[in-house]
């Protein structure tokens, strides 16, 4: 058996990165935040947001708050899309 993709005509591609290795290379505070995140973040996406916030402010807490803000935004979009009124 070649793979578990089933009978599909979709093009497949190999990942160019190793998500676990990327996660291990993240700063400790960011790894802790990702462990408790409500959404599944890619390590590269979280690192990009974190580094941009650190570059702009130099404040780790602001960087983590920015990640939280973006996550809440995504969650609110999901709630609207699902028709929930919470």
Image: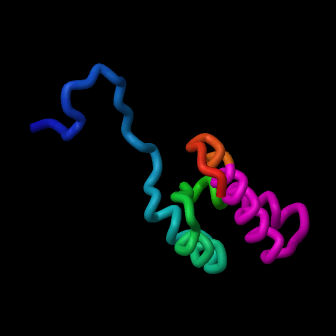
User: In the picture provided, is 41 more to the left or to the right than 85?
Assistant: left
Quadrant position of residue 2: top left
User: In the picture provided, is 61 more to the left or to the right than 31?
Assistant: right
User: In the picture provided, is 61 more to the left or to the right than 28?
Assistant: right
Above or below residue 72? Residue 35 is below
* Residue drawn at the location 24% of the way across and 35% of the way down: 5
Q: Which quadrant is home to the N terminus?
A: top left
Looking at this view, name the residue that lies furthest to the front: 85
Counting the numbered discs, the total is 0
Q: Nearer the viewer, residue 41 or 86?
A: 86
> Residue 73 placed where, x, y %?
72, 53
* Residue drawn at the location 36% of the way across and 24% of the way down: 11
* Residue drawn at the location 64% of the way across and 74% of the way down: 27
> Residue 8 placed where, x, y %?
26, 24
Q: Which quadrant is home to the C terminus?
A: bottom right
Looking at this view, name the residue that lies furthest to the left: 1
For the stretch drawn in magenta, what is the main secondary structure? helix
Above or below residue 12? Residue 64 is below
Q: Which residues are magenta?
A: 48-76
- The color scheme shown is rainbow
Q: Is residue 67 magenta?
A: yes
Looking at this view, name the residue that lies furthest to the top: 9
Above or below residue 7? Residue 24 is below
Quadrant position of residue 53: bottom right
> Residue 31 placed where, x, y %?
58, 74
Q: Nearer the viewer, residue 11 or 75?
A: 75
Q: Is residue 63 magenta?
A: yes
* Residue drawn at the location 29% of the way across and 20% of the way down: 9
> Residue 65 placed where, x, y %?
77, 69
């Amino acid at each position: 058996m070649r793979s578990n993709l089933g009978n599909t005509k979709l093009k497949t591609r190999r990942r160019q990165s190793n998500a676990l290795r990327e996660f291990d290379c993240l700063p400790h505070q960011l790894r802790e935040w990702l462990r408790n995140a409500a959404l599944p973040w890619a390590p590269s996406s979280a690192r990009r947001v974190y580094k941009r916030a650190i570059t702009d402010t130099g404040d780790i807490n602001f960087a983590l708050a920015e990640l939280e803000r973006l996550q809440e935004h995504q969650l609110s979009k999901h709630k609207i899309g699902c028709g929930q009124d919470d």
